[in-house]
Image (cartoon, rainbow, N blue to C red):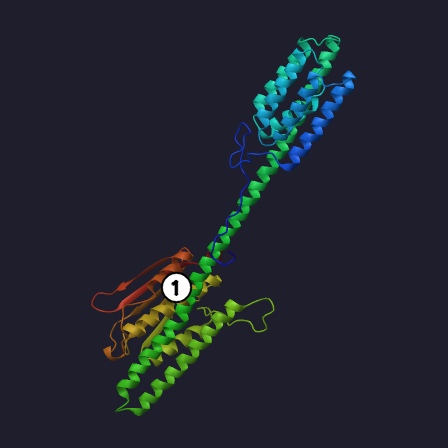
Amino acid sequence: MNQVGRRRDIAVPDAESETGRRIGPARSLPRRGDVLLAAVVTTVGVAMELATYHRLPWVPGGLVAAAGGACVAWWRVRPTAALLAVFLMYVADTVLGVMPVPVFFPLLITFVAAVVFGDRRVAHAVLVAGYLVAVDVPVPGWRAPTVTSAAGLAAWFLVLAASAEIIRARRQARRAQAAELATEAQARQEQALRRAGEERLRIARDLHDVLAHQLALITVQANVGLTLLPRDPRATEQALTAIKDAGNSALGELRSVLDTLRASDDAQTPPRPSPRISRSGDLVELFEGARAAGLGIEAHTDGALPPLPTPVDQAAYRIIQEAVTNAIRHAGAGTGIAVHLACRTGRLELTVTDDGAGSPITQAPGGRNGLPGMRERAIALGGTFTAGPLPGRGYRVVAALPIREDAAS
């Protein structure tokens, strides 16, 4: 699952509804730690009951204490149901005339659990009902609650409710933060996959640009050599030399692309820079290769070109290269090519026109290739691209590339 291009699922914490109920899979049985907590609470409750009445055997309150402690085991799995069960035991203790001290801890634990994990509205309703039972239902052997004790109990209940809400809020904040981090991680992963896809597309275009032009030259020169071999050995030798030069050039550019792919921080030899129109030598080399294939090329620029963003500089070269390559392959030797460059209103406009007057002897089979790649390069930079045959014969490629700074992004 670590391979590039394969998507890894990122776990996002379960969300919660507005009432606080968990959304998603839940455990059906208590955890081992919850059972242990319930055993401790049960032991404490029974001990408090025995200590309160100072006698054996078991009193009804002891049984209630044991049952209340057992409910604590469900505080995480079924918090609201556990709270309601303990509350009923609390009411039963009070009605039976037993001071409900043993269910104090179960009631406290399940109330907080219901607020945090369960239905907080039910939890707060139970708290209010518990307060009313405490102040309105007398317990034999205990003094009736006074105004002061009732106020103190109300304050204690408010502190309990506020504490539970704080715990709930902090838990929700942690879950929201975890969900946000998971979302960010998912976004980073998707961005990485998108960049990997864009990089694959760029590599495919570069490999096409590197190989297609030189292979077209090789094909044309091979046709020339085969045609002229019987009657013009000198021309055949020139064609074979051009094939050798084109092959070496193709190998050099292919090696540059592969070096770029393998480049790392400790690379000793920097990869060969990509060709661009701002370096006159790159265009000269391109045009010389076309002339060696028998094509005539004229290049014209309206004034001096301003500094170009690197992506625009490189894309313009590749578009010209591909247009010349198509002319070499499909128009043939003797074709005239005109390359025109101009900067107008923040755009670099380039036009490559061939007159289609070449010899069919040197034409390569197939239609004009590379048009999708040229169009993709122009559109990726926010530019425009058109290409099509001219009336009669010939072909024209026109591209306009924005030269603002953000075109480099």
- Judge whether residue 225 can be spotted in this image: yes
* Foreground residue among 114 and 390: 114
User: As drawn, is 270 to the left or to the right of 341?
Assistant: right
- Residue at x 75% of width, y 22% of height: 48
* Foreground residue among 398 and 6: 6
Q: Is residue 36 above or below residue 344?
A: above
Q: Position of residue 33 (x, y in %)?
A: 66, 36
Q: Is residue 293 above or below residue 115?
A: below
Q: Position of residue 246 (x, y in %)?
A: 39, 79
Q: Is residue 149 above or below residue 351?
A: above
- Judge whether residue 345 can be spotted in this image: no
- Residue at x 67% of width, y 15% of height: 93
Residue farthest left in this picture: 392
* Foreground residue among 332 and 154: 154
Badge 1 amino acid? Ala
Q: Position of residue 71 (x, y in %)?
A: 63, 26
Query: Which SS class for mark 1?
Result: strand
Residue farthest front in this picture: 57
How many marks do you count on the picture?
A: 1
Quadrant position of residue 263? bottom right
- Residue at x 38% of width, y 75% of height: 214
Q: Is residue 317 above or below residue 56?
A: below
Q: Position of residue 222 (x, y in %)?
A: 32, 82
* Foreground residue among 84 and 20: 84
> Quick one: label 1, few (<14), some, or many (20+) residues within 10 Å?
some
User: As drawn, is 347 to the left or to the right of 390?
Assistant: right
Q: Which residue is mark 1?
A: 342
